Each structure stands twice: as C-alpha cells, then as structure tokens.
Image (tube, grey):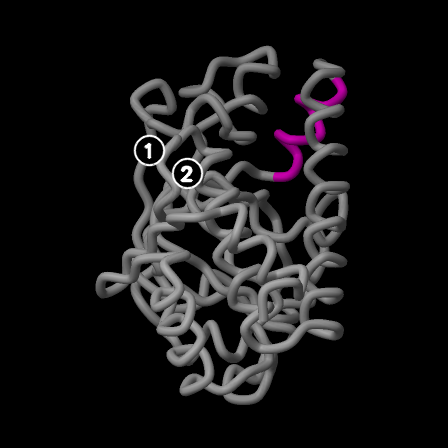
Amino acid sequence: MSEARHDCAMCGLHRICFPAHVASGSDRNANAVRIRRTRVAYGNALYRAGDRIESLYMVRSGCIKELDGADTDHDSIANFCLPGELLTLQSAGPACSRTTCLAVEASFICAVPWHIVEEACAAAPDVASELINLIVKSGVATRELLTMIRSKEALQRVAGFCLNMCARVQWRGHPAREFRLGMSREEIAQYLGLRSETISRCFSELARRGLISVRARRVQVLAPGELRTVFLGEGL
C-alpha cells in the first residue's frame, strides 16, 4: 500500500464524502487534517480481523469486500463497499476489527484518524449528526440483505442485488441506471449465498426478459419497475 496527501476539493466525491465533512467541520482546514489516501492493490487487505482500527475509512475508487472474520477462504462476504461509502463502522472510536477488508480491484481509500473525527463531532453538531445517520443507514442495509438472503429465491436475490447497486450509484449523483461490477461472479455468489453458475443464469434470465443489459462487467437496469416486481416475487 502507498499513501499520499489528497486534495478534497478536487475529488468528485466531495459532496457526499464524510471524511471531507469531518475536515471542514473541525477548526482546521482539510490540508491541516491531512486526510490520507491509501492505495490497496487487488487482493490485498486494508486491515484484518483483530487489527486495531485507528481511522475512519471511505472508498474513493474501486471496491472493497468485508469478510466476517479473518479466514479469507471460508468466511462469508458481509458487504461490498463502493466509492463514496464508509467501511463498516464497528465502534465509535478505535477498536479491534471484527472483519477483514480486501480489495476486489485496485482501490484508493481515504482515511481520517478517529481522534480527528471525535474532535470534529464535538465542534460541529452537523458532523456528529451525519455520523449517526451513517451508522443507522449501515444497520438498515445489513438487515435488508439478511432478509433478502433468507426469504428470497435465486432470481429474486439477483434482482434485488441489481436494484441495490443501482440505487447506491445514483446516491453518488449518477442519474443513469448503470453500474460497474468491480467484483467477480464468484464473489457475488458468495455474497448472496448462491453458486456462481446460478448468478450467471439469473443475469442471463433477467437480460432475456429485457429487464437489464449486461456487457462484460457493466450492468444497465432497463426496467426498474419490472425488476422490482421480480424481486418482490410477483414476476417469477
């Protein structure tokens, strides 16, 4: 991994970047706070279960998968973090990680030391409020995924995954219903509790119905209403 200073004002994610808000909410400017940008090569770990987490991390580019535990061969994928998203907030301050974070493609991560986060939250109530909202949002997303995995058929899970990815891309300010899969079919399968062959069949079936278009790793949602109907189990 390599580190470099990062000019927040030049970043396309500045509008939704929580670390940038931390910097602006403190009594120092972004350069003084020294938000670090760290490159994590494909397959490398940002940190592993048991490591002490001294900073808050946000994905600037690429994709990070979070594993429940340290055994990367057998532990389940708990989450994929996309550009503009924070890695799971495991505590409000430094603590030992319960997850292992690996890059599924070369990724850049922005990091802010926890003591800076705490200072900013104390000095600016809006920063503290945003942190609380992020924690709540993360918890809701986790519960929704568990519901999807436990109660849905394979095609429903893949339809829900596509809708979820599309919504997350749109939240970053991209109006088009299109997203890029940084992760492999095997990783999506592990995430959804399916086989990689099933993932491919489900993508093909959704494309056959004209609900999505798949070109290499780019997926376009063509009919979000109908795709949601499939997710709800009404169009199987």
Image vertical order of residue 75 relative to residue 4, above or below: below
The answer to whether the residue labelled 1 contacts the one labelled 2, judged by CB atoms less than 8 Å apart, is yes
Q: How crowded is mark 1: few (under 14 residues within 10 Å), some or many (20 or more)?
A: few
* Residue at point 50%, 27% (across, down): 16
The first of marks 1 and 2 along the sequence is 1
Residue 143 percent coordinates (x, y) = 76, 58
What is the quadrant of the N terminus in the image?
bottom left
Residue 200 percent coordinates (x, y) = 38, 78
Image vertical order of residue 173 relative to residue 210, above or below: above
Residue 119 percent coordinates (x, y) = 69, 24
Q: Name the residue under label 2.
A: 36
Q: Label 2: state its secondary structure.
A: strand
Residue most toward the left?
216
**Amino acid type shown at disc 1:** Arg
Q: Pick the residue in front: 109 or 181.
A: 181
**Amino acid type shown at disc 2:** Arg
Magenta stretch, residue numbers: 114-122
Q: Residues within 10 Å of mark 2 (few under 14, many from 20)?
A: many
What is the quadrant of the C terminus in the image?
bottom right
On screen, residue 145 versus residue 175, left or right, reads right
Q: Mark 1 points at which residue?
A: 5
Measured Cα–Cα span from mark 1 to mark 2: 6 Å
* Residue at point 45%, 75% (across, down): 202
Asked whether residue 116 is drawn in magenta, I would say: yes
On screen, residue 93 versus residue 80, left or right, reads right
**What's the magenta bit mostly, secondary-structure-wise?**
helix
On screen, residue 104 versus residue 116, left or right, reads left
Q: Pick the residue in front: 22 or 76.
A: 76
Residue most toward the top?
27
Q: Label 1: state its secondary structure.
A: strand
Q: In which quarter of the image is residue 105?
A: bottom left
Residue 103 percent coordinates (x, y) = 40, 64
